[in-house]
Image: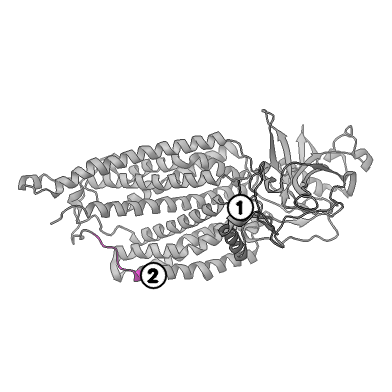
Amino acid sequence: SRALCISDQGRCVWLGSRSSGGSRQPVNMRTPLTWFLGLLVAANWPHVGGFYLPGFSPIQYQDGDIVELKVNKLTSVKTQLPYSYYTLPYCQPPKIQDSMENLGETLMGDLIENSPYEIKMRVNETCKELCKVTLDDAKKDKFRSMIEDEYLVNWILDNLPAATRYRRLGGEFTYMDGFLVGLTQNGRYYIHNHVTLDIQYHENPEKYEGYRIVGFEVEPRSSAAKTKEEACKESTPALDLDGQDEVLYTYDVRWTYSDVRWASRWDGYLKMTGGQIHWFAILNSLLILVFLSGMVAMILLRTLHRDITQYNEVATSEEAREETGWKLVHGDVFRRPNHSTLLAVSVGSGMQVLGMSVVTLTFSVFGLLSPAHRGSLLQSMMLLFTLMGILAGYTSSRFCKLFEGDEGRWKFTTVLTAFFYPGTFFTVFFLLNLCIWGEKSSGAVPFATMFALLVLWFGVSVPLVFFGAYAGFRAPAIDLPVKVNPVPRAIPEQMWFSQPLFTSLVGGILPFGAVFTELFFIMSSLWLHQFYYLFGFLALVLVILLVTCAEISIALTYFQLTAEDYTWWWTSFFASGSSAFYVFLYSILYFSSRLQIDKTVSILLYFGYMGIISILFMLLTGAIGTISAFFFVRAIYGSIKVD
């Protein structure tokens, strides 16, 4: 069957037919021109067979062509602090040159540089000497520290990350991104100073000339050889760091033909375990959704319908005196809540996060954000969060006008929307960055990038928030079906299980239950440096989450109004927003069971970023709950007759 495949390796976009036996190459669309060309081809797809756009094709190498190997940061799941490759005494080229990096790469701490390795297309090398390095005590201490913390070396060849292949129990192969700096056994430290570069290539003379690189694997080994001839021998003992003052770096290059197409070369990296676990998670989430939907349907179709019917009947005086339930609070149900400005700002910021999430996931599901283009996902999220400021301003202004009328504090609300939550996130980020600077890690964001973030915030996001707020205040006020009484009604004493704190904590369990399995894989991607590419699952989980949040807030709001408690605004927010509390608790469990972090800065880094993620999750779920409950309350009070 025909399919459109658009791929971007930082240099190229490929448009053509997808042949059998391969899957679509991860894709990133970076320029308006690329968007236009993609849409143009899609519109005329019945007439398109497959072609290459000039300057947008994958790289074809000829025999003997230079293939550049680049080095990236050293990473560790035990410290979460990346370092430059040349922090360790490795062989260096005559001049170290940095590659251009996007905003996402910089925020992730990527530091891509050139290397002295000489690799030529389809030219095998055996025991080629790279250099000799003399080790003093300071350099040995660096190696010991990196080996103890299980740091990984990350290389890049033709935009493919170096991978170490392992065999699973079932016989299948799995890949680990990068390879270990060295190993420690019985208190001795061994450096990986000899590597075999296994590079796979593919050719198809009928479609193109030359060869395309489709795989890059590294087999590291420790060798105490003094000459390159000794390094080739398997019998050569490992290089004991304490017993050697000089290390010889050598490498082999082995080219092998592969049937894997260039469009499918990322499949090995993107293979993830637990496909059945994902389906189990989806089934679990759907069961929660069915349960909630049944409860809400019962409320709407039975209880609520009966209530409305009874309320609209002509009642006798005795029946009127016996009336109880949510109708009695009609004069207070839309009363302005305490801290109404903060609620308006929180709901507005939640819609900003929701807009960012939906657009990012939409692009990801269609393959427009890819691990092939490093940092593209994080960069897109940052830019979309900035642009969605207009949605935050509009939503917060609508709620401000609802609470306070035309004379509301719209300027204060708008300023708070533009600066409160973004300012909180930036302050935490800046303080954590200071800690990373203190560790001299490459993960520290430079001042130039900090300034770029401030420009995005003050130059783009803040004006968009004000523009959205202006549009929101200019729009007509939302019509309410009932008027607010001048004097507040007394709220009957509530049972302990009807208190907002208890109901909110109970309500947050269900939205968290809908996402906790997928949350495990996302956190593994963040903190264990694994690839995450199951965006289809994630999009489905997001839909289930949104519906779950809406239904749990509607249900708890109804129960609260039935108890004649009209202070439902904040309850509707935290009924679903409290799921963020369980997300943070889960992060503590994940930290204690899955991670081996013991450094103070690394612990601060983990809980600082998980705190930000939890707040974002609270804003998203709370906003959905509040808006859903508001339209529910507005609908039920609009359907009864009020004197």
Is residue 567 visible in the rendered structure shown here?
Answer: no
Name the residue tied to disc 2: 471
Q: Which residues are magenta?
A: 473-480
Q: Quadrant of residue 98?
A: bottom right
**Which residue is at a point 39% across and 54% down the rendered structure image?**
623
Residue 185 quadrant: top right
Q: Amino acid at mark 1?
A: Leu
Residue 303 in the image: state x and y as whole percent: 22, 41
Q: Secondary structure at mark 1?
A: loop
Q: Is residue 276 magenta?
A: no
Classed neighbour count for the residue bearing mark 2: other residues with Cα under 10 Å, few (<14), some (14–19), many (≥20)? some
Mark nearest the camera among 2 and 1 is: 1
Let me know if residue 475 is in the magenta part.
Answer: yes
Q: Which residue is mark 1?
A: 4
Mark 2 and mark 1 in contact? Answer it, CB < 8 Å: no
Q: Residue at x 46, y 59 (%)?
A: 352
